[in-house]
Amino acid sequence: MGNPGTPSFLLLCALLILLILQSSSSASHIIGDDRHFDYDENSEFGPEHWGDLYPDWATCKDGNKQSPIDINHKNIEVNSSIGSLMTRYDSSYAIMQNRGHDIMINWTEGTAPGAGFLLIDGKAYVLQQCHWHSPSEHKFFGERYPLELHMVHVSSDGSIAVIGIMYQFGCPDPFLSELKKYLEYLIMTQNDEVVVGYLSPPPIKKGASYYRYSGSLTTPPCTENVTWILLHEVRTVSEGQLRLLRTAVHDKDNARPIQPINGRKVYLYKPRIHEDHASS
């Protein structure tokens, strides 16, 4: 992307700083809603009723491009032309927040909001936050995993792109290992948030295979036209790490039920040999 010190590189940096500031100020209302909802199928606030709770949540019941979905042989189409993932993430000021229904890492409160960016079809999306769902919300070939991480990115025009990562039980996840003491603090104190300080997002491997489709936020207001990128690689998490995440939200499941595919295609990207990437 250019050598540091060159005019083109400096111009790109300036444009990205402007983009980060614009996306942070314009899209905070898009990716979260403080009004109460839950995941209990027997509750009046559960997923089957989200679309009836508030008029601006109607998309949760009326939308035709809702997430999560089951990714399987019936809807997958291999398409390498969509290109490899291009990311550049940085260490940035972070706060861990317990939103009641999930644990979130918020990178929007620092002097330079955001923790880097993702490029899709030439458009830059700034990484604003990440959070976890247990069990996983998406399914791969009918299988739910113990954990799913969502990395939420927003562009200057308010468009949303989410990278989803699945986890199966195995070795501890390095990112969660960094966050262990902050999770323990929230559990012990019952506080809603704790300052983490400068924190780097989980890395995305160069040339990673992934699934891509058009969907929605998986929580109210269930906004559609979200670009979903689900890594093909399933990472690992230890049982102790998952226990901490679940204890912080009182050991409640926080996965929305699978939504109808409604004829949508899921594009599978596989890297070509010698393809160029930009990632960190």
Image: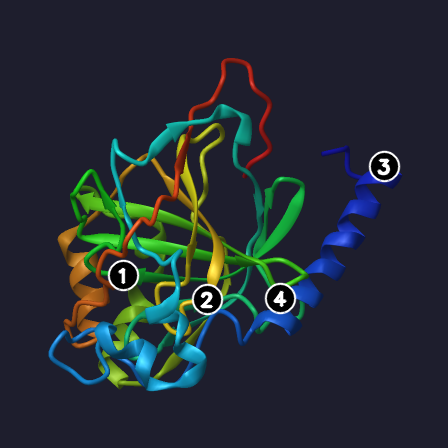
Say which label, 2 or 3, has the lower sequence index: 3
* Mark 1 or 3: the one toward you: 1
10 Å crowding of disc 4: few (<14), some (14-19), many (20+):
many
* Mark 2 or 4: the one toward you: 2
Q: Amino acid at mark 3?
A: Thr
Say which label, 1 or 4, has the lower sequence index: 4
Q: Is residue 123 left or right of residue 46?
A: right
Numbered label attached to residue 223 = 2
Query: From mark 1 to mark 4, how far is it between C-alphas?
Result: 24 Å
Q: Amino acid at mark 1?
A: His
Discs 2, 4 touching: Cβ within 8 Å = no
Residue in view at x 38 percent, y 29 percent:
77
The image quarter in which residue 64 lies? bottom left
The residue where tag 3 is placed is 6
The residue where tag 1 is placed is 133
The residue where tag 4 is placed is 113
Q: Position of residue 242 (x, y in %)?
A: 19, 59
* 254 vs 258, nearest the viewer: 258
